[in-house]
Image (cartoon, rainbow, N blue to C red):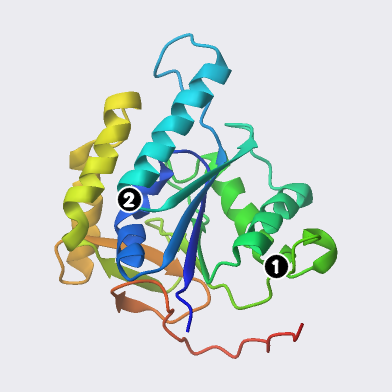
């Protein structure tokens, strides 16, 4: 049986700090793990009045440095930073990537109402990625790639007001690496304060009687504490049967 592939579709190079422990856990299990950033993060003013093309190059370099640190693959698309729109065309573009990669599970942004999580790019990226799971099943959308029709459960970064079922990962064993990758971004662009990251992880951990935990909304799978997202935990669902061919 082949190892699963976990795809994280995120808006900006630094979003992955919020799921770094989960990516590490999945990679440690022998899975293929890929981060797909829709934008290159060119709208940051962390480096002053540099041309946006130069900022984009720097952000892409940071993202790939972090991907290497995590031991995962990294890819970029060229959606405009701070102007991502969840159009059918955007969904089709990501669907074509999914048809190539054929992920076994997806991490992306969900619906959220708090600062940071509710960034319009995050909200649009989540809808694009979730739509793309469906569009990737359509041969006319993804040609010349073959459609990807296997079940691809969705896990979204969990906001504080979410009422969806929760899947949680104990990431205490990956703490050093989580803070290492966050520090790469903190030094470069000021994002990733260690006390904020630790606070998030410990707050979630308290709900599961663990030290450090990352939580996700489980859209299509069972909930509870797991050691990795894939293979997914079966939930009380009657999914539509997979189409053949």
**Can residue 198 be seen from the camera position used here?**
yes
Residue for point 71% across, 65% down: 136
Frontmost residue, 132 versus 200: 132
In-image side of 188 versus 39 (left or right) = left
- The crowding category of the residue bearing disc 2, from other C-alpha atoms within 10 Å (few below 14, some 14 to 19, many at least 20), is many
Q: Report how far apart the C-alphas of labels 1 and 2 lie in the structure.
A: 28 Å
The residue carrying mark 1 is 134
Residue for point 39% across, 78% down: 223
Q: Earlier in the sequence, mark 1 or mark 2?
A: 2
State whether residue 44 is above or below residue 145.
Answer: above
Residue for point 68% across, 71% down: 148
Frontmost residue, 48 versus 141: 141
Residue 90 image offset from top left, x and y in percent: 72, 47
Residue 99 image offset from top left, x and y in percent: 68, 63
Q: Quadrant of residue 234?
A: bottom left
In-image side of 143 versus 79 (left or right) = right
Residue 72 image offset from top left, x and y in percent: 40, 53
Pointers 1 and 2 in contact (C-beta within 8 Å): no
Residue for point 49% across, 90% down: 236
State whether residue 107 is above or below residue 10.
Answer: below
Residue 103 image offset from top left, x and y in percent: 56, 67
The residue carrying mark 2 is 70
In this view, the residue farthest toward the top is 49
- The crowding category of the residue bearing disc 1, from other C-alpha atoms within 10 Å (few below 14, some 14 to 19, many at least 20), is some
Residue 31 badge = none
Quarter the C terminus occupies: bottom right
**Can residue 43 be seen from the camera position used here?**
no
In-image side of 53 versus 138 (left or right) = left
In-image side of 150 versus 19 (left or right) = right
Frontmost residue, 100 versus 199: 100
Q: Quick one: SS at disc 2?
A: helix
State whether residue 37 is above or below residue 147.
Answer: above
């Amino acid at each position: 049986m082949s190892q699963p592939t976990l795809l994280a579709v995120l808006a900006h190079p630094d979003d992955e700090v919020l799921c770094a422990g989960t990516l590490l856990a999945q990679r440690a299990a022998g899975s293929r793990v890929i981060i797909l950033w829709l934008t290159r993060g060119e709208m940051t003013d962390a480096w002053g009045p540099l041309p946006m093309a130069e900022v984009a190059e720097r952000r892409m370099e940071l993202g790939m440095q972090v991907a290497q640190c995590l031991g995962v693959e990294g890819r970029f698309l060229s959606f405009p930073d701070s102007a991502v729109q969840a159009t059918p065309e955007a969904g089709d573009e990501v669907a074509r990537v999914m048809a190539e990669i054929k992920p076994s599970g997806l991490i992306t942004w969900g619906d959220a109402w708090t600062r940071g999580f509710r960034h319009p790019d995050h909200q649009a990226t989540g809808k694009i990625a979730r739509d793309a799971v469906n569009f990737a099943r359509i041969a006319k959308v993804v040609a010349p790639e073959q459609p990807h029709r296997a079940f691809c459960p969705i896990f979204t970064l969990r906001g504080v007001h979410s009422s969806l079922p929760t899947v949680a990962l104990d990431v205490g064993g990956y703490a050093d690496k989580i803070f290492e990758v966050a520090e790469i971004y903190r030094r470069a662009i000021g994002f990733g304060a260690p006390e904020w990251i630790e606070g998030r992880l410990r707050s979630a951990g308290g709900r599961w009687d663990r030290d450090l935990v990352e939580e996700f909304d489980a859209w299509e799978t069972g909930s509870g504490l797991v050691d990795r997202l894939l293979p997914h935990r079966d939930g009380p669902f009657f999914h539509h049967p997979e189409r053949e061919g």
